[in-house]
Image (cartoon, helix red, strand yellow):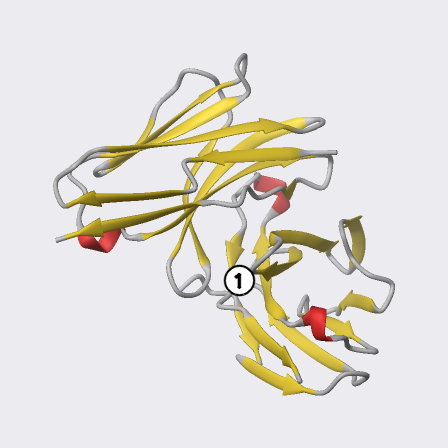
Amino acid sequence: DSGVTQTPKHLITATGQRVTLRCSPRSGDLSVYWYQQSLDQGLQFLIQYYNGEERAKGNILERFSAQQFPDLHSELNLSSLELGDSALYFCASSDRGSGEPQHFGDGTRLSIL
Amino acid sequence: EDKVVQSPLSLVVHEGDTVTLNCSYEVTNFRSLLWYKQEKKAPTFLFMLTSSGIEKKSGRLSSILDKKELSSILNITATQTGDSAIYLCAPRSGSARQLTFGSGTQLTVLP
C-alpha cells in the first residue's frame, strides 16, 4: 500500500460527459502528479501541483483541468469526454523537498462508452 | 522532446534465470532515473539512481546508471514467477521533477 488513495476505482460514462477523479496524497507529501496510462501511449505525465499551486504541465488537454486543495487532496476534472479518453488515470505524490521518489495510487479506470 | 527507450519490449524466461533490462534516455535537465515495477495496478517504486556507476541493490534486484551513455540497466537474478510484471524506467527532469516513462519491458517468468 503506497498510502496514495484514489477514488473512484472505476468510472463508466458516455461521450460528452464530465467526470472528477480524486486523489489523496500520502501523509506529509506536498506534491501531487497526475498521469494517464493508455494502451497505445503508455504512462504520460499530465500535470503537477505543489502545495496548492500548479508547478508543471505535461500532455494535458484543454478539456482537462486539475486543482489541489488546502488539505492537499487533488482533483482531476475531465470534460467533453471522448472515446479516446478511456484510460487508467494515476495520481502520485512525493515530498518534493526531500527529493523522495513518487509513489503511485492504484488508479482510476475510466471507460467511455 | 524527452525520449525514453526500453529494451527488450518483452522477455520470457524460466525461473532461476538472470535477466537484464535496458533503458536509454534523452531528457533535458536530467535529475535522476527511477525504476518501477507494475503488476496489475499501480507502479511500485524500486530504485532511484542519481549518480553514475553506483549500484543500488535490493535482494535479487540491482540497478546502475551510466550518465555518460545516458542509460541504465536493471538486473534480476534467480528470477521467480512473482517477478512477472512490466518494468518501467523513468528519468526525472526539470525543476518540477516530472517523470517521463518508457514503454516498459514485459517480463514473464515461467515455472
Quarter of the image for residue A111 reads bottom right
**Closer to us: A45 or B13:** B13
Please determine whether, in this image, residue A74 is positioned above or below residue A98: below
Q: Position of residue A81 (x, y in %)?
A: 78, 77
Q: Position of residue A11 (x, y in %)?
A: 60, 83
Along the horizontal axis of the image, is A84 left or right of B71? right
Quarter of the image for residue A68 reads bottom right
* Residue positioned 45% across, 26% down in the render: B72
Q: Residues within 10 Å of mark 1 (few under 14, many from 20)?
A: many
Residue farthest right in this picture? A62
Along the horizontal axis of the image, is B45 left or right of B32? left
SS state under label 1: loop
**Closer to us: B88 or A96:** B88
Please determine whether, in this image, residue A99 is positioned above or below residue B50: below
Q: Quadrant of the N terminus of chain B?
A: top right
**Closer to us: B78 or B55:** B78
Please determine whether, in this image, residue A74 is positioned above or below residue B104: below
Along the horizontal axis of the image, is A39 left or right of A2? right
Residue with the mark numbered 1: A26
* Residue positioned 75% across, 68% down in the render: A70
Q: Position of residue A14 (x, y in %)?
A: 72, 87
* Residue positioned 12% across, 40% down in the render: B16
Along the horizontal axis of the image, is A25 left or right of A19? left
**Closer to us: A21 or B1:** B1
Q: Position of residue A19 (x, y in %)?
A: 73, 81
Q: Chain of mark 1?
A: A
* Residue positioned 43% across, 42% down in the render: B9
Q: Amino acid at mark 1?
A: Arg
